[in-house]
Amino acid sequence: MTLEQTVLEARNLTKTFVTRSPMGRTVAETKAVDQVSLSLTAGRTYALVGESGSGKSTTGRLLQGLITPTAGEVIVSAADGSKLTQNTKRSNRDVQMIFQDPYSSLNPRRRIRSILEESLRIIGEKDPTTLRSKVDEALSAVGFSDEHAQRYPHEFSGGQRQRIGIARALVASPRIIICDEPVSALDVSIQAQILNLLRSLQADLGLAYLFITHDMSVVRYLAHRVGVMHQGKIVEEADTAELFANPQHDYTKRLLASVPIHHPSQRTTAKG
């Protein structure tokens, strides 16, 4: 994989959710994502930020193929340079996801090895030797061993469960990982460990991340480029340093002003 290569492109993505009456008539329509376009680059992190309800997680699920867009398209660039539309077996293998809640996203009735092997079976891998070796490799990448693979999810802490979530994303050898607020449910010290792990994996594997968050301090630490979402639209997009130094949109200014600052002399007030 060549760094700086565009590996995923979203073009005018739109998602409208329709509420219907028991008789089947349309009662209301909610446009959760509205004409969103963005691109992800190998070895770099694109942060999608905004308050709850702005459409960030819906955008992530559209890019991963978990839900179908009302309009627009997602193009995934294969390693050989060919273009794949979303929801093909190859594109689904290339794009994986880390969820916000590491416990609810893991089957409590299955051992960790079984959970990770299931991810490979879904994309068509059946050879037992390959299944075992890929699971071992993914667990090793997040600091676990075969002994951990025999446990159940409830036997791990929250931070350890999120490492398992990362391993499940890695096991398919993806090129793109969508991180849907993966550290928001963790203690601050554990957040730092997970963020450092993600940075290390990106450096080693050349992964492209879409990092969905509302935490601007995490954005400053991890992201190379930032898209600011408000009411389903990307209202501003810039490199991270430029966005923090010179925000242009009023909504971006309000987001940055909401970040706690300890020293009174450094605080600013944004109207609106």
Image: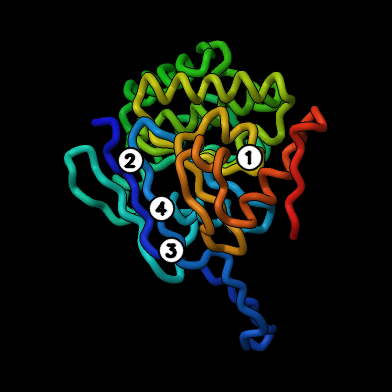
Point out the tag, 3 or 2, that comes first from the N-terminus. Answer: 3
The image's mark for residue 100 is 1
Q: Nearer the viewer, mark 2 or mark 1?
A: 1
- Rendered view: 224 above or below 73: above
Front-most of 260 and 162? 260
Q: Nearer the viewer, mark 4 or mark 3?
A: 4
Cα–Cα span, label 1 and label 4: 22 Å
Point out the tag, 3 or 1, that comes first from the N-terminus. Answer: 3
Three-letter code for the amino acid on which mark 1 is drawn = Gln
**Left or right of 76 on screen, residue 162:** right
Point out the tag, 2 or 4, that comes first from the N-terminus. Answer: 4
What kind of colouring is applied to the model shown?
rainbow
The image's mark for residue 38 is 4
**Left or right of 197 on screen, residue 84:** left
Residue for badge 3: 13
Write the residue at 18% across / 47% down. 82
Write the residue at 48% across / 50% down. 237
Q: Nearer the viewer, mark 2 or mark 4?
A: 4
